[in-house]
Image (tube, helix red, strand yellow):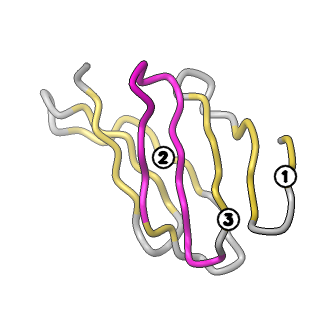
Amino acid sequence: MQWRWAADVTGVIRFWNYLTQQCVYTIDEHRPSKQTLGVAVNCFEDKIVTFGADSTIYVYDVKTKARLMHLTHRSYFNN
């Protein structure tokens, strides 16, 4: 696939087309801590998982860019 993902400490996930070197779209996570520390992609490249300084994990759908769920160390929430 021609996509690459990058997270930054402002809570923004950027989706890059590495062939054209263009940022295709972004997702602003609106984390309480404003710090997204990392991003991972599943083997099918249809889901993205991010984690941040607030100990929360978010799961996104790549096609719709929708947040599917978030997980915390205390509980599990759909959304």
Which x, y percent locates residue 75?
Answer: 86, 60
| Left or right placement of residue 49 versus residue 30 in this view | left
Segment colored magenta: 38-54
Per the image, the residue denoted by label 1 is 76
Residue at the spot 39% in from the left edge and 25% down from the top edge: 43
Structural crowding at the residue carrying mark 2, measured as other residues with C-alpha within 10 Å and reported as few (<14), some (14–19) or many (≥20): some
Per the model, the C-alpha gap separating discs 3 and 2 is: 19 Å
| Left or right placement of residue 4 versus residue 54 in this view | left
Question: Relative to the observer, which residue lies in front, 18 or 51?
Answer: 51
Per the model, the C-alpha gap separating discs 1 and 2 is: 25 Å
Residue at the spot 53% in from the left edge and 45% down from the top edge: 49
Q: Quadrant of the C terminus?
A: top right
| Left or right placement of residue 59 versus residue 46 in this view | right
Q: Mark 1 vs mark 3: which is more N-terminal?
A: 3
Residue at the spot 53% in from the left edge and 53% down from the top edge: 50
The amino acid on which the numbered mark 1 sits, given as a three-letter code, is Tyr
Which x, y percent locates residue 16?
Answer: 29, 39
Query: Tag on residue 64?
Result: none
Q: What element carries label 1?
A: strand
From what the image shows, is residue 36 above or below residue 44? Answer: below
Q: Does the magenta stretch include residue 39?
A: yes
Question: Relative to the observer, which residue lies in front, 39 or 26?
Answer: 39
Structural crowding at the residue carrying mark 3, measured as other residues with C-alpha within 10 Å and reported as few (<14), some (14–19) or many (≥20): some
Q: Mark 3 vs mark 2: which is more N-terminal?
A: 2
Per the image, the residue denoted by label 2 is 26
Per the image, the residue denoted by label 3 is 56
Which x, y percent locates residue 64?
Answer: 62, 24
Which x, y percent locates residue 35?
Answer: 53, 75
Q: Nearer the viewer, mark 1 or mark 2?
A: 1
